[in-house]
Amino acid sequence: GSADKTALLWDVASGSIVHRLAGARKEVLSVSFSPDSRLALTGGGDGTAILWEVSSGRMVRKLGGHSEAVRCVCFSPDGRLALTGGADNTVILWDVVRGGIVRRLQGHTNDVLSVSFSPGGTFAVTGSPDGAAIFWDVNTGEHLATMHNMTSGYLWTTPPTRNAPCGWLHTDREDLVSVFRTREESDEIRVLADGEPDRKSYLEIYNRQDMV
């Protein structure tokens, strides 16, 4: 992909250009091949992804759904779905065959710079400069867990659930976790100190590797 609004398909053996994929309105920022190499997907600075037929260089369709640049793209292992990550902080799951949006995945607070499917295609992971890698259920769009970037140690969190109103966590840096106590009858909020028994009890319950 290039700032000249094109992507070039190269013959690696000969070093010659096979096709020039032209049709983007702004720079091409990302490229990915389908697993069977029949299709290619490019992401552009205009917020559009374009699906291409590799053998002919023909544009199959445009996938418009992001409000800002498409920074990363990838196909699912079976080639029927695709993910695009944008500078609008969102991820879109696409039906490659029909060209429609399956769902939007929202959870990042900065550009999405990387997207990937698990080998079985059941899960996806997305990465961003917001310091988080988010794990998703592809079939439901559920936000499963977040891995936070740490200078040392590790921190995983999950969204709130019925059994964990503040979510589960898994960390070896409990010193970075703040536990608050609130009172329903007032607006009082108090941070529990490190040595308080209630703080220790809370972390014993909710700092659980098996739940993240």
Image: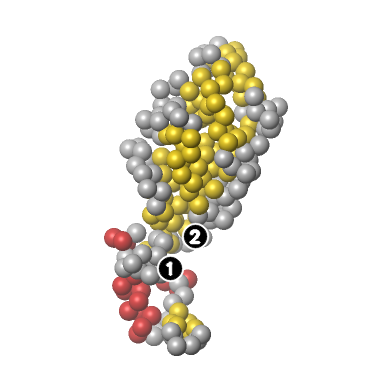
Is any atom of residue 212 visible in this view? yes
Q: Secondary structure at mark 1?
A: loop
- At label 1, counting other C-alpha atoms closer than 10 Å, the crowd grade (few under 14, some 14-19, many 20 or more) is few
- At label 2, counting other C-alpha atoms closer than 10 Å, the crowd grade (few under 14, some 14-19, many 20 or more) is few
**147 vs 172, nearest the viewer:** 147
Image vertical order of residue 49 relative to residue 146, above or below = above
Q: Residue at x 36, y 83 (%)?
A: 198
Q: Residue at x 45, y 22 (%)?
A: 37
Q: Residue at x 43, y 68 (%)?
A: 173
Q: How far across and down, in percent of the image, does residue 96 sit? A: 45, 30
Image vertical order of residue 92 relative to residue 60, above or below = below
Q: Are marks 1 and 2 in contact (CB under 8 Å)?
A: yes
Q: Which residue is mark 2?
A: 150
Q: How far across and down, in percent of the image, does residue 169 sit? A: 38, 65
**134 vs 64, nearest the viewer:** 64
Which quadrant is home to the N terminus?
top right
Q: Secondary structure at mark 2?
A: loop
Marker disc for residue 173? 1
Q: Earlier in the sequence, mark 1 or mark 2?
A: 2
Q: How far across and down, in percent of the image, does residue 197 sit? A: 35, 85
Marks 1 and 2, how far apart at CA: 10 Å
Is any atom of residue 74 visible in this view? no
